[in-house]
Amino acid sequence: MSKYRTSLPQIDGGTFLSDGGIETTLIFHDGLDLPHFASFVVLDTETGRRRLKSYYEKYLAIARDHGVGFILDSATWRANPDWGARLGYDAAGLRRINVAAIELLEELRAEWETAATPCVISGAIGPRGDGYKAGNMNADEAEAYHGPQITAFADTAADMVAAFTLNNINEAIGIARAAKTRAMPCAIAFTVETDGRLVTGKTLPEAIETVDRETDAAPVYYMINCAHPSHFEQALKAGEPWMERIRGVKANASAKSHAELDESETLDAGDPLDLGQRYRRLKRTFPKMHILGGCCGTDHRHVAAICEACMPLAMSA
């Protein structure tokens, strides 16, 4: 049974951390083979489950040491029908793996949660296609496509769902509608190119305002992920209503473009201290951005640097 589904603690403010780039960490630091960049496959072995627990525990220790909350996002970004089929998972197999991912997070919450560090369990959803290329689904198709994964999460202890690296507004609308139908709180995280726009050319305000208009503001909040802060800082405007809807950032370590990252065979881990300072400036300008984590190329060192840079602001807020 879920613990926070009807009252998400991060909505009330206070700093919440989340993890970093799970796939890049498992591939480049742990030496695991993740076909099609799918981290959920490690859940099928006991060794893989132990690796995942160890991965999350590095971040949970940072949160507990600093007395802040934590969002436990499941390793299910690729656990949808198209990507699952490429990896040999049918509908029943995908449901099983999505449920198993949440069960692992339940174990972690039982071991790590304290009164000062509430742990919210979030079922992670990824785009149907490539997060760096525009999809072409309409909203109805997206609602039907992502519905089974959200249903699987709704039948577990997951407190919410979060859709990451979305670049298609219609897909975001469909996911938000599917989550609303299943009474699952939903966060939507858009990714942008180096010009601060979605790959379709749409702006962040266009994306957020359109999803809100078409879903009666169903998402509980929005985030930006899988882009370096230098790519989207110029797109953020203090004082505008749509900015009030952005509550979190999970940025890339590298300032390279998505096209450059796609061609790279090595990991660009960037500069954790510089990333922390960029988050500090973002949080100073936009105080409601209090959910802080990382994406591609980041690991627990980046999140620790972000926490160290932002905690003074969080404590004085």
Image (cartoon, rainbow, N blue to C red):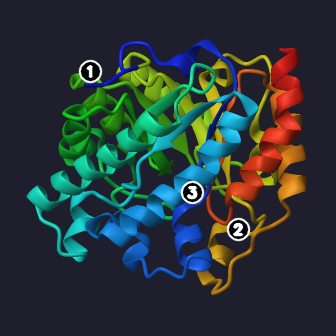
Q: Quadrant of the N terminus?
A: top left
Tell me the amino acid under the disc marked 2: Ser
Label 3 neighbourhood size at 10 Å, few (<14), some (14-19), many (20+)?
A: many
Residue 54 spot, x, y in % from top left = 52, 59
Query: Tag 3's secondary structure?
Result: loop
Rendered position, 202 above or below 246: below
- The residue drawn where x is 76% and y is 34% is 236
Query: Which quadrant holds residue 246?
Result: top right
Q: Earlier in the sequence, mark 2 or mark 1?
A: 1
Residue 18 spot, x, y in % from top left = 60, 42
Q: Disc 2 vs disc 3: which is toward the camera?
A: 2
Query: Tag 2's secondary structure?
Result: loop
* Residue 257, numbered circle: 2
Residue 87 spot, x, y in % from top left = 24, 75
Query: Which quadrant holds residue 292?
Result: top right
Instruction: Name the residue that disc number 1 marks.
Output: 183
Marks 2/3: CA–CA distance: 11 Å
Residue 14 spot, x, y in % from top left = 69, 20
Left or right? Give the position of 146 relative to 203.
left
Which sits in the foreground, 99 or 84? 99
Label pair 2/3, CB-CB below 8 angstroms: no
Left or right? Give the position of 316 relative to 165.
right
